Amino acid sequence: MEKTLAIIKPDAMQAGNAFAILELITNHGFKIVRLAEKQLTAYQAEEFYAEHKGRPFLPELVTFMTSGPVVVVVLEKDNAILGWRDLMGATDPAQAHEGTVRKLFGTSKGNNATHGSDSQASAAREIAFFFDRA
Ligand code: CMP
């Protein structure tokens, strides 16, 4: 079974969509093996998104990700990494397919409701970033 990291971002939390997103996740056969609410610091957000260092949108992303609490979740399923990215849909909600999390709950490329690991290496790093054991 593969594991991946999901984050329910501040926009989805603020809009009250956290449980609807978790329900969509479990309805698609993912097992939630860890779950925690966090308030990220700017330092943590910059570390988490280190691969985007130097990108023009990083300061905006850090401000957004620290603007309120997030829920971080470890999901388990066969092919969880690709499966969760498919269920999230495209980064830009305007490009996301009907029924995907970002189409349903995202409002812009920045405010796109959720995050998901993009590879096995990212999943391992991102899970370890938030959880001692998963
Ligand atoms: P996420 O999956 O969390 O990974 C990096 C995030 O950067 C991405 O989702 C988007 O929310 C954000 N992002 C990517 N491109 C842009 C952009 N052009 N403007 C603002 N945010 C962006």
Image (spheres, rainbow, N blue to C red):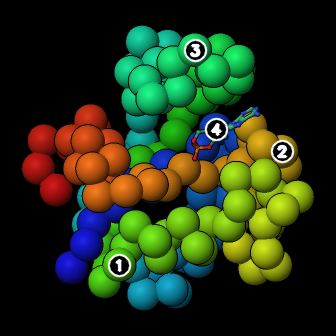
Closer to viewer: mark 2 or mark 3? 3
Q: Which residue was labeled with disc 4?
A: 10
Q: Which residue was labeled with disc 1?
A: 79
Closer to viewer: mark 4 or mark 3? 3
- Asked if residue 21 is positioned above or below residue 72 in the image, the reply reads below
Q: Earlier in the sequence, mark 4 or mark 3?
A: 4
Q: Secondary structure at mark 4?
A: helix
Q: Is residue 35 visible?
A: no
Mark 3 is surrounded, within 10 Å at the Cα level, by few (under 14), some (14 to 19) or many (20 or more) other residues, namely few
Q: Earlier in the sequence, mark 2 or mark 1?
A: 1
Of residues 21 and 117, the one nearer the viewer is: 117
Q: Is mark 2 within 8 Å of ligand 1?
A: yes
Query: Residue 57 at what x, y percent from top left?
Result: 70, 23
Kindly report the distance in space between the C-alpha atoms of the residues bearing marks 1 and 3. 31 Å
Kindly report the distance in space between the C-alpha atoms of the residues bearing marks 4 and 1. 26 Å
Labels 2 & 1 near each other (Cβ < 8 A): no
Closer to viewer: mark 4 or mark 1? 1
Kindly report the distance in space between the C-alpha atoms of the residues bearing marks 4 and 3. 23 Å
Residue type at numbered disc 3: Gly
Query: Residue 15 at what x, y percent from top left?
Result: 76, 48
- Asked if residue 30 is positioned above or below residue 85 in the image, the reply reads below
Identify the residue at horizontal 58%, vertical 73% (top origin): 86
Q: Which residue was labeled with disc 3?
A: 54
Tell which quarter ligand 1 is in: top right
Q: Earlier in the sequence, mark 1 or mark 3?
A: 3
Q: Which residue was labeled with disc 2?
A: 108
Kindly report the distance in space between the C-alpha atoms of the residues bearing marks 2 and 1. 27 Å
